[in-house]
Amino acid sequence: MNKVMLITGAAQRMGAYFAQSAHADGYNIVLHYRHSFEQTQVLQSQLNDIRANSCISVQADFNKKQDFNEILDMINSHFKRLDVLVNNASEFFSTKPEETSINDYDRLFNSNVKGPFFLSKTCYPLLKKSHGTIINLVDIHADKPLKNYPVYSMAKAANKMMVKALAKEFAPEIRVNGISPGYIQIPIDGKELKPEILDRIALNKKGDTKNIYHSIKYLIENDYITGQVINIDGGRSLSM
């Protein structure tokens, strides 16, 4: 029986790449999305054309408690197992303190902290049965804040602590790890990073989404790693 991977925020960007790559590696895929219905349906069709009945999609808003259980119900109904949860969904936008609203704060913490925590909690029974793995997409700015993005940086710091806390809570049945990407792709808000950023990257180049997926595979396959967050940043964090 094919193993099953749930990827949040899977409609586009890194999430879609993870889904395509994991599917090529033999996983059945659960695509989570919030608003991106059309993109998700296209991706789901593409994957099912390659291997029939290998991919489902589920809409969920992490502001709504009932949506977490609906994800679990869909997985139970279609696959009856879950082996890997990739908490990839995230919001990212500037929050200068003088301009930040309570809604801005809630949006960033809901997507980066509340969602991954309660989804991990909800998926715990299925992951426990399979001795599965949870992988959070964190950020190198969980350690050093990004100017003009204090709430995002705070939320990612909480996400990083979640990795360590849940690794202790869910052991020994479930392993929990994280990946902190550096300069991999243009940020969600579309703002290009300044060219001088490259000068602060030890390897002097932008990363690629495949670098992140390779790390996901490593954390899945190495069954003696838990509670760790790996920086995939080309050495960017050495000069932050």
Image (cartoon, rainbow, N blue to C red):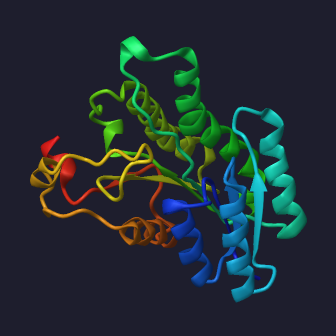
Above or below 108: residue 15: below
Above or below 236: residue 2: below
Q: Quadrant of residue 3?
A: bottom right
The residue lying toward the viewer, choosing from 177 and 69, is 69
The residue lying toward the viewer, choosing from 72 and 209, is 209
Residue 19: percent from left, percent from top? 59, 70
Left or right of 102 in this view: 183: left
Left or right of 154 in this view: 105: right
Q: Quadrant of residue 231?
A: bottom left
Above or below 152: residue 240: below
The residue lying toward the viewer, choosing from 110 and 81, is 110
Residue 171: percent from left, percent from top? 59, 50
Identify which residue is drawn at 36% across, 69% down: 211
Quadrant of the frame with the C terminus: top left
Q: Quadrant of residue 133?
A: bottom right
Identify which residue is drawn at 41% across, 51% down: 228
Residue 76: percent from left, percent from top? 86, 61
Quadrant of the frame with the N terminus: bottom right
Identify which residue is drawn at 61% across, 59% down: 10
Left or right of 97 in this view: 82: right
In the displayed image of the protein, which residue is found farthest to the top? 98
In the displayed image of the protein, which residue is found farthest to the right? 77
In the displayed image of the protein, which residue is found farthest to the bottom? 50
Identify which residue is drawn at 19% across, 46% down: 194
